Image (tube, rainbow, N blue to C red):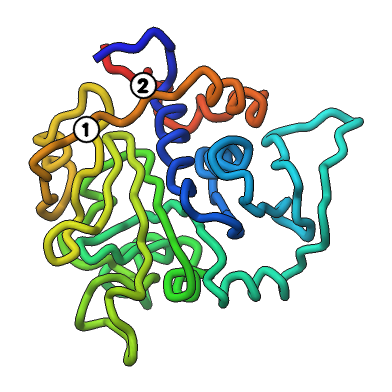
Amino acid sequence: MTNAIEYSLAELMICANASAYDNDGEVLVTGIGVLPRIAASLAMLSNNTDIMMTDSEAWLLSEPNPIGPRPADFRQKNETWMGFSRIFDNVWSGKRHLTGGPTQIDRFAQANISALGSDYRQPKVQMLGVRGFPGNSICHANSYLVPQHSTRVFVEGECDVVCTIGFNPERLPKGYSFDEIDVRQVYTNLGVFDFRGPDRQMQIVSLHPGVTVEEVQANTGFPVHVPDTIVETAPPTEAQLEIIRRIDPHNLRSKQLKDNPPGVRA
């Protein structure tokens, strides 16, 4: 399938991620990383204008800031103060939706940003630590963006360090049910996925142009549910691309995926 509008794979992923917030209403949205940040800003300026967004420091914005260097005369549009205490009010109330970028995701939708290796006391690779992931995953909606869909990310067993709540019955906290866990969607360079398949299995929501089911399964360390009908990820509109260019005037999005591939494979 071809489209008259040319777009990159990064822009396709941004638009797909922006759709995560379509029905959220007035919630605090946080996109961690360049592509999720642009996606959250795109959503705020298009499909969900009720979104709340901070400047990542102390202010709630009426319009999202562009990413990258800004002109000397730039003035961000502050709406009200939004310090840490008010952030936590949003987190604990569930009025937040975060898109992060885990290093590992397993078949239970558990995610890891902490360390790699079987021995946590002597990890092969030390990363961020669990940070806010445990509380985020328990309290509010979370989506994930993965630039390179591979078995190194979608691992065969459990994550080396389980940083988030997921659909593992052996790790479910006392008093919790699976219905209280809100893992929305996963956005990768191959497609869009969720954990609403049979028995909370990860399933295909859409595939990007030119991607096959076989390619997805070969790059996932556990079985992926394939629905009877698979749709193609919706291409960006010209209006969306114009907003993306405004939010990312320095084209930092082009540096997030290796070689900045096109959205439609040759």
The spot of residue 40 in percent (x, y) is 56, 44
Where residue 194 appears, x then y in whole percent? 27, 52
Q: Is residue 78 left or right of residue 55?
A: right
Task: Say if 201 sits above or below 265 in the image.
Answer: below
User: Foreground: 180 or 104?
Assistant: 180
Hey, which quadrant is residue 227 in on the image?
Answer: top left
Residue position for label 1: 231
Residue 88 in the image: above or below residue 196: below
x and y percentages locating residue 117 in the rendered image: 29, 65
* Residue that sits furthest to the bottom in the current view: 174
Looking at the picture, tell me which residue is in the foreground, 46 or 2.
46
For label 2, the residue is 263
Q: Nearer the viewer, residue 31 or 18?
A: 18
From this view, report whether residue 60 is shown above or below residue 169: above
For badge 2, the amino acid type reads Gly
Secondary structure beneath dot 1 equals strand
Which residue is found at the position 24% from the left and 52% from the top? 154
Q: Is residue 189 above or below residue 53?
A: above
Q: Quadrant of residue 165?
A: bottom left
- Residue beneath the point at 14% across and 30% down: 212
Amino acid carrying mark 1 in the image: Val
Of 249 and 40, nearer the camera is 40
The quadrant of the picture occupied by the C terminus is top left
First reached walking from the N terminus: tag 2 or tag 1 = 1
Task: Give the residue at the far top of this rendering.
Answer: 4
Quarter of the image that includes the N terminus: top left
Which residue is painted at 20% across and 48% down in the image?
Answer: 151
